[in-house]
Amino acid sequence: MDAKVFLKETYGNTRYQLGGHGKRTVGVLKEAIVNVDDRLPSDQYGAGKLIEDFQQKMADYLGKETAVFFPSGTMAQQAALRIWCDAKGLKIVAYHPLSHLEIHEQDGLKELHGIETVLLADKNRLIKLDDIKNLGEEVACILLELPQREIGGQLPDFEELEQISGWCRNNGIKLHLDGARLLETLPYYRKTAAQVAELFDSVYVSFYKGIGGIAGAILAGDEEFMQQSKIWKRRYGGDLISLYPYILSADYYFDMRAEKMGQYYEEAKELAELFNSCHTVSTMPLKPATNMFHVHIEQPMESAVRIVSEVQQETGIGMTGYLVQAAGDRCSFEISVGDALAAIPKDALKELFQLFNQKLQHPH
């Protein structure tokens, strides 16, 4: 069996996992709807009490006039950027080189909307105010991702965010928040979601990442912007006859986990310390800014895959189902702490890292 396939298989066979909220099975939906009244009317084509109440709940949480539920964040964000481009009559936006729109969406923004993109900052660091001031060309909108996932979930200081927001507003540039993991940033900033969202003209939040729902996203902003977003949602085919399985699970897991982000954040810092205590292992960042971080292993890919697979088999605790090649003899994977970590017995967790460290010190 291919080593990488074996790694994924050993992870899938583990009893416990370091990251996430547990294995994604149909039980995620069953748990969310078990106590829902069978007679509750479904939403239909984006209308109805079920969807409208949830949209208002999220608008209030984010401190925005209104919000619209989308089946995917990709759809929501492309629509948002198109709206801001049309409003200014300029099809140019700027974002980080490792933005989801740039590396994971098959150039959807460019191919579907003809929007040009300007890449801000070096790919290995956060966008700073000076990067925006030195753009050198006019843009309709700037997208900021909080946290910046592809560099380990790093976050700018809140003061820098305030300065960026003020500069954009003073210069007629719309600021959009890729807040797929917005809730995860709140313990670090010690702010409410509304206080962070206030700095942005439009905000997107995911319901399957940190929240652990099935799928779906919210897009929030002022009334005029959101009316335009409904049109684009229809054009994208996002107004399914019913979205209630996504909405009910989003609502259920939001209520369950929104207030637990501080717990996940503290546990992530403790987990990062355990990784950093291991031979040839370091985390990015060394001290996580959210419940998410990257684990880097300075070992050849073949050796790292074998070691992680063996540890998972021998302990029954899943570290990761994949490894990606980094510069030189280094590979990495991502961890987002959720409910799953707290379920692991402390003795078992200690055994995991002792064994992992031992195998890293003697890889052959």
Image (cartoon, rainbow, N blue to C red):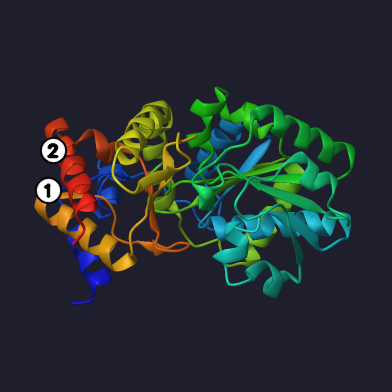
Visible residue check, residue 210: no
Q: In the drawing, does residue 144 fall left or right of residue 214?
A: right
Pick the front one: 6 or 89: 6
Q: Are marks 2 and 1 in contact (CB under 8 Å)?
A: yes
Residue placed under numbered mark 2 in the picture: 348
Instruction: Judge from the rendering whether residue 248 lies leftward or rightward of residue 68; answer left or right.
Output: left
Residue wearing tag 1: 315
User: What crowding class fits label 2: few (fewer than 14 Cα within 10 Å), some (14-19), or many (20 or more)?
Assistant: some
Under tag 2, what secondary structure? helix
Q: What's the amino acid at mark 2?
A: Ala
Image coords of residue 262 (percent x, y)? 42, 26
User: What is the quadrant of residue 195 in the picture?
Assistant: top right
> Is the C terminus in the top left, top right, bottom left or bottom right quadrant?
bottom left
Q: Residue at x 80, y 46 (%)?
A: 132
Q: Amino acid at mark 1?
A: Thr
Percent position of residue 350, x then y: 17, 35
The x and y percentages for residue 288 are 46, 36
